[in-house]
């Protein structure tokens, strides 16, 4: 098995991966700001980090992952105030929706899913450390980080600080600062705004301090991996480095991994263009969670992702080809014995799959290796060359595949119903199909051919094709 290599944004190089603590990987993931439903660009990043943790676990590592929920910022405060409710009440709806979306997409929950508002004390303590080291100053009740004090500023984004002007990508805090490039650690309250009364004065945390404080609380002062979207490199992740390393004097993160942008049908996703989609928008159109996950996983994370509805249909077909192959392996009676050529071909596919993922999570190559094998083995089975004793090795490989991609065993219809959506074409779950197939087989055995034909027609109307096998069995597949 090839050594793991990741592209580190900090160095701009593909680097061998070794965790700081042997056998354990500590990961921090920037989660959503829960002021609205997360969109498919967000989930492109979250599916990537899910594949990352699944792959590292497959390689034998223990995982300690923290993901934050940003549940306080200007938009949240404003929206909650307009509705006359607390920020906790306002954000709870979207926080729960995010968790439901994660489950629908088979994204594993991190070991620590943390809310910013539950960690005010940790943020205050970190600001106090920075103040003791003279990295901060006060202005109109707010506390700012003086970025010229930190000589390493810009090492992640490669930004030339001397050329940065107010505006553009620099955070606009709407507060008085000595230098427009400085960023807020603690924001003074405005009339009518929610705030916390603390040792450093009344107010609320700035965005950047939240992630540093929570990451270091649960993972220590140096993390193995920090993930996020490419849009967070500057200023958010750059500011995380500045405040964390100024406080501790240690490297904050050893490997920075960033997912590239998602565009829709070749254009930037925008509500004004009418191409802005949440996961729930896609589910409402009848698209299955497994198809969406597969599509989001199919393009390597460092490549720009062009989301198209044609691509989503192709993803649905790909998932069905894989599922139909698994059903065939489990239900068809194959000739006895084994075939060494088949065994060797499975070993080759497994090696190609593993090597692709070791190479900076190249999911496209891993999927290609899998589909090449499935195509060859379907042909072999058609010609009687796939033997009974070959099947367990094939299923073992597909189990390894699904430990990463997690699309083979889902009950899409049930997940969609749980979120209040109907599956396309009144989709049947695998369990419902199996029950009808079993009923049809029973009808055939008692020679009730009318009922058997009715079930076949019923399944055909729902997009399920039955294929009777030579040994008297049956296998099914979706159109």
Image: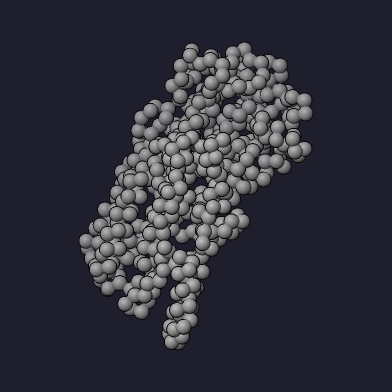
415 relative to 214, above or below: below
The part of the image, by quadrant, that contains residue 201 is top right
153 relative to 301, above or below: above
Residue in the image at 40% along x and 56% along y: 317
Residue in the image at 34% along x and 75% along y: 469
Residue in the image at 51% along x and 37% along y: 269
The part of the image, by quadrant, that contains residue 296 is top left
Residue nearest the viewer, comparing 463 with 32: 463
Give the percent coordinates (x, y) of residue 350. 31, 53
Residue nearest the viewer, comparing 265 with 475: 265
The part of the image, by quadrant, that contains residue 200 is top right
Q: Quick check: 145 left or right of 83?
A: left
Give the percent coordinates (x, y) of residue 115. 63, 39
99 relative to 376, above or below: above
Q: Is residue 373 visible in the rendered structure shown here? A: yes
Residue in the image at 38% along x and 34% along y: 7
Q: Quick check: 14 left or right of 39?
A: left
């Amino acid at each position: 098995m090839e050594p793991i290599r990741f592209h580190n944004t900090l160095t701009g190089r593909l680097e061998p991966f070794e965790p700081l603590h042997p056998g354990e990987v500590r990961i921090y993931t920037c989660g959503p700001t829960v002021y609205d439903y997360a969109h498919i660009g967000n989930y492109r990043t979250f599916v990537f980090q899910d594949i990352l943790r699944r792959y590292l676990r497959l390689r034998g590592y223990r995982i300690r992952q923290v993901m934050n929920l940003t549940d306080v910022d200007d938009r949240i405060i404003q929206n909650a105030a307009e509705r006359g409710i607390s920020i906790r009440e306002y954000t709870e709806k979207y926080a729960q929706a995010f968790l439901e979306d994660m489950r629908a997409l088979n994204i594993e929950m991190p070991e620590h899913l943390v809310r910013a508002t539950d960690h005010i004390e940790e943020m205050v303590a970190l600001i106090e450390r920075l103040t003791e080291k003279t990295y901060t100053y006060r202005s109109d009740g707010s506390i700012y980080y003086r970025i010229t004090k930190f000589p390493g500023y810009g090492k992640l984004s490669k930004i030339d600080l001397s050329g940065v002007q107010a505006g553009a990508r620099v955070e606009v805090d709407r507060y008085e600062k000595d230098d427009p490039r400085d960023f807020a650690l603690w924001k003074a309250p405005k009339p009518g705004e929610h705030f916390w009364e603390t040792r450093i004065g009344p107010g609320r945390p700035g965005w950047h301090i939240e992630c540093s404080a929570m990451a270091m609380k649960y993972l220590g002062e140096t993390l193995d991996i920090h993930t996020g979207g490419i849009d967070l490199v500057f200023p958010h992740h750059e500011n995380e480095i500045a405040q964390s390393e100024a406080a501790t004097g240690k490297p904050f993160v050893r490997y920075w991994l960033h997912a590239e942008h998602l565009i829709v049908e070749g254009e930037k996703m925008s509500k004004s263009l009418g191409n802005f989609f949440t996961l729930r928008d896609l589910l409402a159109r009848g698209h299955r969670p497994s198809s969406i996950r597969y599509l989001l996983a199919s393009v390597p994370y460092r490549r720009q992702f062009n989301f198209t509805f044609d691509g989503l249909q192709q993803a649905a077909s790909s998932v069905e080809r894989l599922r139909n192959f698994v059903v065939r392996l489990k239900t068809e009676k194959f000739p006895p014995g084994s075939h060494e050529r088949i065994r060797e071909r499975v070993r080759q596919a497994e090696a190609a799959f593993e090597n692709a993922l070791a190479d900076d999570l190249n999911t496209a190559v891993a999927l290609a290796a899998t589909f090449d094998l499935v195509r060859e083995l379907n042909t072999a089975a058609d010609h009687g060359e796939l033997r009974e004793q070959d099947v367990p090795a094939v299923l073992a490989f597909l189990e390894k595949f699904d430990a990463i991609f997690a699309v083979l065993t889902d009950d899409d219809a049930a997940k969609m119903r749980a979120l209040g959506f109907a599956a396309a074409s009144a989709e049947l779950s695998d369990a419902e199909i199996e029950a009808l197939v079993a009923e049809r087989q029973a009808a055939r055995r008692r020679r009730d051919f009318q009922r058997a034909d009715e079930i076949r027609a019923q399944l055909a109307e729902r997009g399920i094709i039955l294929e009777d096998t030579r040994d008297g069995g049956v296998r099914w597949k979706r159109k």
